Image (cartoon, rainbow, N blue to C red):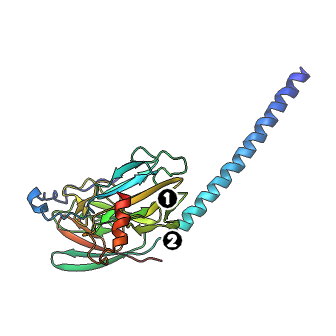
Amino acid sequence: MFHPKTSLLSDTDVITQEEHLEIQDSLPEDAFFIVGGTTNFPLTEPVINIGRHSENDLILNDPHVSRHHAQLRAINKRYVIFDVGSIGGTLINGKPITQATLFNGDVIRLGMTNLIYVQTNRSTNPTTAIPTDEDLLDDEELR
Amino acid sequence: MNAIITLILRILLVILAYAFIGGVGYLIYKDLKSTVYQQELVAIPLIIMQVNMDQQTITKRFSQPEIILGRDPSCDLILDNSKISLRHSRVTFHDKHWWVEDLDSTNGSFLNNVSIDTPTVITNGDQLKLGHVLINITENQT
């Protein structure tokens, strides 16, 4: 075990709360998962753990899902999924990945469970082309 | 009397046989585990930390599986700043990713300005903030 030499090193100076005001919101707005085609799981945290273990934020009761299967992180108003050493792997639209940025309509497969990623807000990504009528129709179908 | 001794010997033989099978199984398991561990050791990608402290930038490269960040001289990355805890945060490589976790530091650890409450995967371009120290993360993907 580690024993800090407190006699040699001074205590840590505390930063007051006011100094942490610059926290920016990197969460995508209105993003959610459709779990197994039935239930919606809103994505409102900057870090979301997915797996079979009860510690996870999104618990999947599927024997093919690892206890700690994947982690989601909000980076620059986009969710990024990381496979965290699961046995069955994580597939996005059928392709196995270790790390991937999620886009609206992506299908994530963990074990035998399908998650559909929905992010309806278009203004979050200014680089996307102007939506065509077809895209808008697709969007309405999803709603 | 002879029959009892024979029975005991037979039972002993069965126990020995099962113990042997069990032992072989255990050895195979241990061997497999150590191979997997060695593979993981080889596969650790380089992590580059660009530390911005007191208007100075220092670049550090790490390839060991565990890096402790803090003010204590025993840390792997020593951040000599009064707002940094002795052992502030830990960066580890496991399950194919680099992870960061806060070690109950006084002022907390922040990843892209979001407080770290759970071990979190870090990726290229992330920025860690411990106290007023900024650390830019670059991963060498191999």
Left or right of A51, for residue B61: left
Which chain letter matches label 1? A
Image coordinates for residue B87, horizontal then vertical, percent? 27, 59
Residue A9 in view in this figure: yes
* Residue ID for mark 2: B43
Q: Residues within 10 Å of mark 2 (few under 14, many from 20)?
A: few
Q: Can you give x and y, in whole percent of width and height, for residue B72 in the image?
A: 26, 63
* Amino acid found under the numbered disc labelled 2: Ala
The image shows residue A87 at horizontal and vertical percentages of 55, 57
Give the structural element (helix, strand or loop) at label 2.
loop
Examine the rendered structure and indicate whether residue A97 appears above or below residue B59. Answer: above
Q: Which chain carries label 2?
A: B
The quarter of the image holding the N terminus of chain B is top right
Give whichever of A121, A112 is nearer the camera: A121
Residues flagged by tags 1 and 2 on a common chain: no
Q: Which residue lies furthest to the right in this view?
A: B2
Identify the residue at the far top of this view. Answer: B1
Question: Label 1, on which residue?
Answer: A109
Q: Give left or right: position of A82 versus A24.
A: right
